[in-house]
Image (cartoon, rainbow, N blue to C red):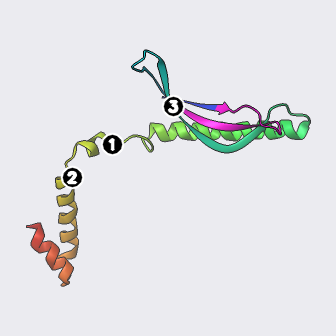
Amino acid sequence: MKLTIEKKSADSTGRQQLLLTRNYGSYLNENGKRVKRRKRQSLDLFIYATPKDKFERDHNKKTLDISEKIRAQAIVDLANNKHHFEDSEKQQESFYSYMQQIINDKVHILSSFDHPIALTLIAYSH
């Protein structure tokens, strides 16, 4: 996967919106046409397409630095599997064994209490 910062075309005020683009590659559709798989996320940042003074040039420089930091954080998150990927062990585990483990943990915690819910959980866990 490739992460890039894209600039939309300038609007009527001369501002370009910045987007974080996640490129997942491409594939051929049934017509033999190459289709790109990507997702775009608006960063709610803009730059001036043609900066007219020092203020606008400084704004562009700071905004591009911020967008690169966002891109770098997205790369770190991707490397740490925080977004868009599930743990393969969690996907292969059955739901029944997962729920049984949770029930056993709850029973262990609640077994010291004399409460109707705890007693019900203990009765159904065995």
Residue 125 falls in image quadrant: bottom left
Query: Label 3 vs label 1: CA separation?
Result: 22 Å
15 left or right of 85 in image? right
Q: Which of labels 1 and 2 is toward the front?
A: 2
Q: Give the labeled residue for mark 2.
A: 95
Residue 28 percent across, percent down from the top left: 42, 18
* Identity of the residue drawn at 17% across and 64% down: 104
Residue occupying image coordinates x 71% and y 38%: 17
Residue 11 against residue 119 in the figure, above or below: above
**Residue type at mark 3?**
Arg
Q: Dividing the image into 4 quarters, which one contains the C terminus?
A: bottom left
As drawn, which residue projects farthest toward the left? Answer: 126
Indicate the position of residue 89 as horizontal and vertical percent values: 26, 42
Q: Is residue 112 visible?
A: no
Q: Position of residue 1 (x, y in %)?
A: 48, 28
Point out the stretch of residues depicted in magenta: 6-23
Up-down: is 95 above or below 35? below
Q: Amino acid type of disc 2?
A: Phe
Per the rendering, the mark at residue 38 is 3
Q: Residues within 10 Å of mark 2 (few under 14, many from 20)?
A: few
